[in-house]
Image: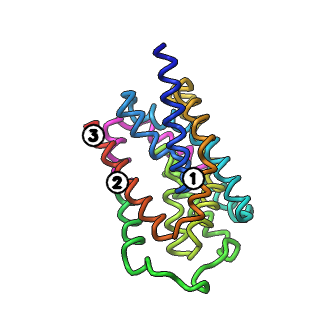
């Protein structure tokens, strides 16, 4: 019976996380990790590895939905994926060697910095509507820059289990002037191979638990399409504000464990 209720709770939680991930283009792993630690008592590495079981299929489905809305430039994404693969493995090896208490606080600091950035983007002067000429298409940015973004995204994805896309999107929107949804789509595309590497690395070290991760993944997959649909319906500034608020909630959940 305990197993039944655990699986049922994971299905429901996965649905909520998948919807949130679809809206924000992050696969939902940022939400799953603190919940696994707070509710199930997982150490940080185990929470990150288990969340990856849910994240990978959710990212693939989210990516498919974004591609249906607007075709993704796969060559640009591939440039970032090449560097992301190697750096994700390096980051995962670093994370597995850290003390869980220290890793959790580093993770909370990472989340806080991203939240501050998105609050600034949504509430500052930049929240005013921009002319169409301000934005660039994905293919207009040099492939070398995607390669560089992939390095940062890969390290973040390896160390934190998730977060590569969260780190990549601000670079793509602020420095290269991509639209929020375009940046989210290409960022997800470039981290898919690295996410596979991260999951394999965490699983090899016994830090990925399928009994929890698989029902989380199933629930997430059912609700991702609705989140993506809402993402395209919301104004960009509001989308960024929601993202920032959710990140602060995540940081609070992480710090609640002490």
Q: Residue furthest left?
A: 258
Q: Which residue is mark 2?
A: 248
Residue 256's disc is 3
Q: Is residue 107 magenta?
A: yes
Callout 3 crowding tier (Cα within 10 Å): few <14, some 14–19, many ≥20? few
In this view of the protein, which residue sits in the foreground, 119 or 143? 119
Residue 247, relative to residue 149: is it above or below? above
Residue 151's disc is none
In what element is the residue under mark 3? helix
Q: Give the image location of residue 125, x and y in percent.
A: 39, 81
In what element is the residue under mark 1? helix
Q: Which residues are magenta?
A: 86-111
Mark-to-mark CA distance, 3 and 1? 28 Å
Mark nearer the N terminus (3 vs 1):
1
Which residue is found at the position 50% from the left and 42% from the top?
A: 16
Residue 34 appears in which quarter of the rendering? top left
């Amino acid at each position: 019976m305990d197993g039944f209720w655990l699986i049922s709770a994971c299905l429901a939680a996965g649905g909520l996380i998948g919807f949130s991930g679809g809206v924000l283009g992050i696969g939902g792993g940022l939400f799953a990790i603190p919940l696994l630690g707070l509710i199930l008592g997982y150490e940080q590495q185990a929470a990150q590895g288990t969340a990856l079981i849910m994240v990978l299929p959710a990212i693939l489905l989210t990516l498919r939905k974004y591609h249906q809305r607007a075709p993704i430039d796969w060559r640009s994404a591939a440039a970032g994926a090449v560097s992301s693969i190697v750096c994700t493995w390096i980051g995962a090896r670093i994370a597995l060697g850290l003390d869980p208490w220290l890793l959790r606080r580093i993770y909370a600091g990472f989340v806080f910095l991203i939240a501050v950035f998105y609050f600034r983007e949504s509430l500052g002067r930049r929240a005013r509507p921009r002319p169409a000429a301000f934005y660039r298409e994905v293919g207009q940015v040099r492939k070398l820059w995607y390669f560089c973004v992939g390095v940062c995204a890969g390290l973040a994805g390896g160390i934190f289990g998730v977060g590569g896309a969260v780190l990549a999107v601000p670079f793509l929107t602020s420095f290269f002037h991509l639209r929020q949804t375009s940046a989210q789509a290409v960022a997800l595309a470039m981290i898919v191979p690295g996410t596979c590497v991260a999951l394999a690395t965490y699983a090899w070290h016994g830090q990925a638990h399928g009994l929890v991760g698989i029902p989380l993944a199933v629930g997430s997959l059912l609700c991702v399409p609705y989140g993506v649909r809402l993402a395209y319906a919301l104004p960009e500034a509001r989308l960024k504000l929601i993202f920032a608020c959710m990140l602060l909630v995540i940081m609070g959940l992480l710090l609640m464990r002490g």
